[in-house]
């Protein structure tokens, strides 16, 4: 059960006694929607009532999409949606719809694509303006309450867009028709223009490309902000079991150690936060998501199984024990997420001052040398390392616990074993956790999502077997029985979500079916897995290959999408293809891999789940041959395609140990420098272990979106790489950057640069 003090969402009827406003979201079960139930905005949930009202009143729709633990979603709510004057403008001019992206990923995916086409960037909160026919004509993300930096504030934007809708219907219609055509073209994978072969060599090449931005200094891939990239870690491990590769295993182990030692891991509670704001894994974004911990739990167990390193098993146990203690309902289902903030301060619950920790540990009657040991092991003796980003003067004044040195190193210096060291630290961690649990807690999102639960069921079932922990197996079985009993109707249809005893709602999506079938196979419940897979094929499969994200019976979206790229979650098509391989449905599996063949060749580094499915197919059945198809449709460039063309990169040798990487950045664009600053995507070059990169300083520039100066690269930039020893074979470097112009930023991309050795 959730630990004592975890904030929950009080029943709506209690809020009604003290809140001056109540809107239609008060009848919803989503914690995110309930957060907005007492805004002065006349919010509607996504559905026919809102659509019919928009058509009847001939008003455009304002669609706002977010999720319960999204920091900037809370900011826009406080600044705009709780402002009575702004709410009055919204109510007068628009039909306002609020969507929880975790409940309706189909709505989120479709309109996020539209926003990316319109603005070349995307994120949450997502703000989209639609016609009553649900066709988008303008979009963006966060909008401030007042005009700033040359950009209109939200109230002025509302006035401008309503005027455009009323006074220039021809322009709006032209925009929506063009955009709808683009969305239809982008909704299905591009066919290959030439015959292709997916075989063991091409899969190796995709994996190498995916790992080309490995950070040999800090572990992990890419620069700040830095995500664990669990789908890639799983792909590496799965492929490692098929075709061992010592260099890849070394990079993976370095990454897992860095994650486990960094502040991204909650060293008292055992779970992992969502991502690190820096390259060193020290300062996390403090959200805790069920899916992150499910996937990382599986990765650490599999890493232990392959290496025998006990430290990986200990990290996995910490994850699972945390989830069972704090994110599990009485019925056995798993909750969705913990918020990042308490009282509008990110991470408040997780932070300590040195004096607070000393007081707690001394009151627990621990000897003084143990207190000093704890402070040394977890980096507290090195001084404060965290400053609240929106409070105070910016000087660090609190501590995130982390391991500045591996426990093995500390234990060796003390001439004791790691187990002995951990036994001395464990009661002190428990004392601090007990005190922390009495603090005001971050909000706990108690939604139960089928797909996210399935990821945790799979991980627990796997861990129960590998680690010989029967309670993990029992927890997986209990949660699986909950989903099959409570999230499935008599006809076999799955439901997406429920909350605290409420009736489940929203017809499930491809991810829900695919992830659950995968989890049931891990449990050994093949009969149930077959039933789920049968329904998945009936509702989502295209006869020519691949699966749509929404059911064939879905009626409330203008376009039905087939998605192959991973988000933080593995793609539904990747997991569905894997399930088809496991069930022996070889034709459906092959066709699913084949339909995404061109995408795998172009952008396989963002499609790890499908690469894994392809690797499983190739291992069992040989290469996948894909014929060329002539397409008469001119497909528009995606924002990612555009971003890749912005920078031209060439490599030349200066000496046997040094090379130069010349970047030529398209006129009118810049990329953020390596020293761009906190919260910005730094340009980084992934190099082999032992090599170093000399980055030029960025040019200080004032841009509309930033309050201060931003350091950027423009024109021609030279990065110099120095190797410890002379390379003897071709090397692949990974260049990660984000390109922006004066008004928008393109998606972050990682490009492979081949460095040939003569």
Image: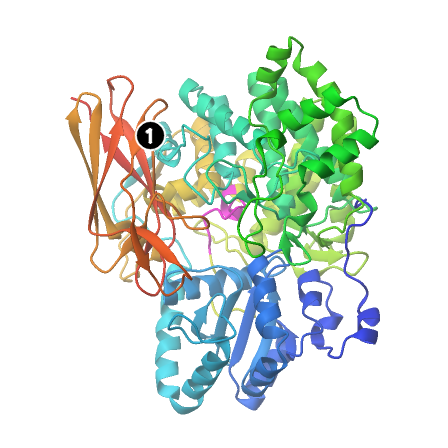
Q: Which residue is drawn at 56% across and 19% down?
A: 306
Secondary structure beneath dot 1 equals loop
Residue annotated with mark 1 = 687
Q: Which residue is drawn at 29% across and 40% down?
A: 196
Say if 285 sits above or below 416 in the image: below
Q: Residue at x 63, y 41 (%)?
A: 455
Q: Which residue is drawn at 74% across and 19% down?
A: 423
Q: Where is residue 154 in the image (x, y as percent from the top left)?
A: 49, 76
Say if 48 sits above or below 287 in the image: below
Q: Is residue 643 visible?
A: yes
177, 231: nearer the viewer: 231
Q: Position of residue 502 (x, y in %)?
A: 79, 60
Q: Position of residue 726 (x, y in %)?
A: 24, 18
Asked if residue 566 lies in the magenta stretch, the reply is: yes
Q: Viewed as shown, does residue 604 lie left or right of 558? A: left
Magenta segment main secondary structure? loop
Image quadrant assignment for residue 683: top left
Q: Where is residue 490 in the image (x, y as percent from the top left)?
A: 76, 56
Asked if residue 304 lies in the magenta stretch, the reply is: no
Quadrant of the snapshot with the C terminus: top left
Q: Viewed as shown, does residue 433 lie left or right of 240? A: right
420, 94: nearer the viewer: 420
Q: Magenta segment, which residues?
A: 562-574
């Amino acid at each position: 059960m959730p630990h004592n003090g975890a904030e929950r969402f009080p029943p709506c009827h209690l809020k009604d006694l003290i809140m001056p406003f109540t809107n239609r979201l008060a009848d919803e079960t989503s914690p995110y929607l309930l957060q907005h139930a007492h805004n002065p905005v006349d919010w509607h949930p996504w559905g026919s009532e809102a659509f019919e009202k928009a058509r009847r009143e001939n008003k455009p729709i304002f669609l706002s999409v977010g999720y319960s633990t999204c920091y900037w979603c809370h900011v826009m709510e406080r600044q705009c949606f709780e402002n009575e004057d702004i709410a009055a403008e919204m109510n007068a001019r628009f039909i306002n719809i609020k969507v929880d992206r975790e409940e309706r990923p189909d709505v989120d995916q479709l309109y996020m694509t539209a926003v990316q086409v319109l603005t070349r960037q995307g994120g949450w909160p997502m703000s989209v303006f639609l016609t009553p026919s649900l066709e988008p004509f303008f979009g963006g993300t966060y909008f401030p309450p007042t005009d700033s930096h040359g950009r209109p504030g939200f109230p002025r934007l509302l006035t401008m867009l309503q005027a455009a809708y009323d006074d220039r219907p021809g322009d709006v219609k032209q925009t929506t028709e063009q955009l709808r055509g683009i969305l239809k073209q982008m909704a299905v994978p591009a066919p290959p223009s030439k015959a292709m072969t997916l075989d063991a060599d091409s899969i190796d090449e995709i994996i190498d490309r995916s790992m080309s931005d490995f950070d040999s200094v800090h572990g992990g891939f890419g620069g700040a902000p830095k995500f664990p990239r669990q789908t890639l870690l799983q792909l590496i491990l799965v492929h490692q079991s098929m075709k061992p590769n010592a260099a890849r295993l070394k990079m993976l182990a370095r990454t897992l150690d860095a994650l486990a030692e960094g502040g991204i891991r909650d060293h008292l509670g055992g779970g992992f936060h969502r991502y690190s704001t820096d390259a060193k894994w020290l300062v996390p974004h403090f959200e805790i998501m069920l899916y992150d911990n499910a996937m990382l739990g599986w990765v650490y167990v599999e890493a232990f199984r392959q290496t025998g390193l006990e430290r990986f098993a200990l990290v996995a146990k910490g994850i699972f024990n945390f989830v069972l203690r704090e994110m599990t309902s009485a019925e056995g289902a798993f909750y969705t997420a913990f918020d990042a903030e308490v009282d509008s301060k990110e991470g408040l619950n997780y932070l300590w001052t040195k004096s607070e920790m000393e007081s707690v540990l001394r009151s627990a009657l621990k000897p003084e040398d143990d207190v000093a040991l704890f402070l040394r092991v977890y980096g507290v003796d090195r001084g404060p390392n965290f400053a609240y980003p929106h409070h105070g003067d910016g000087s660090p004044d609190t501590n995130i616990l982390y391991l500045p040195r591996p426990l093995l190193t500390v234990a060796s210096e003390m001439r004791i074993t790691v187990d002995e060291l951990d036994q001395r630290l464990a009661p002190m961690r428990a004392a601090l956790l007990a005190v922390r649990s009495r603090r005001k807690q971050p909000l706990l999102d108690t939604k139960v999502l089928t797909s996210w639960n399935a990821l945790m069921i799979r991980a627990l079932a796997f861990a129960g077997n590998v680690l010989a922990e029967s309670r993990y197996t029992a927890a997986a079985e209990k949660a699986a029985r909950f989903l099959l009993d409570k999230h499935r109707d008599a006809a076999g249809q799955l439901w997406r979500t429920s909350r605290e005893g409420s009736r489940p709602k929203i017809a499930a999506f491809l991810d829900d079916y695919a992830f659950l079938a995968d989890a049931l196979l891990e449990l050994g419940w093949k009969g149930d897995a077959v039933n789920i897979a049968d329904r998945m094929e009936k509702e989502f499969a295209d006869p020519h290959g691949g699966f749509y994200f929404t059911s064939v019976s879905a009626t409330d979206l203008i376009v039905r999408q087939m998605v192959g790229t991973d988000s933080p979650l593995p793609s539904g098509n990747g997991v569905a293809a894997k399930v088809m391989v496991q069930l022996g449905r070889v034709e459906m599996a092959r066709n699913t891999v084949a339909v995404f063949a061109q995408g795998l060749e172009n952008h396989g580094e963002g499609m790890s789940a499908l690469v894994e499915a392809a690797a499983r197919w190739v291992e069992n059945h040989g290469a996948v041959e894909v014929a060329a198809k002539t397409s008469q449709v001119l497909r528009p460039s995606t924002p990612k395609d555009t971003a890749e063309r912005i920078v031209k990169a060439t490599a030349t040798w200066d000496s046997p140990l040094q090379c130069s990487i010349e970047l030529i950045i398209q006129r009118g664009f810049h990329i953020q420098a390596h020293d761009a600053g906190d919260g910005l995507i730094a340009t980084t070059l992934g190099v082999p272990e032992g090599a170093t990169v000399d980055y030029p300083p960025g040019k200080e520039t004032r841009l509309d979106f930033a309050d201060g100066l931003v350091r950027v690269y423009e024109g021609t930039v030279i990065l110099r790489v120095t190797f410890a020893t002379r390379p003897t074979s071709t090397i692949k470097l990974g260049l990660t950057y984000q390109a922006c112009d004066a008004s928008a930023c393109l998606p972050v991309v990682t490009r492979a640069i081949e460095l040939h050795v003569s």
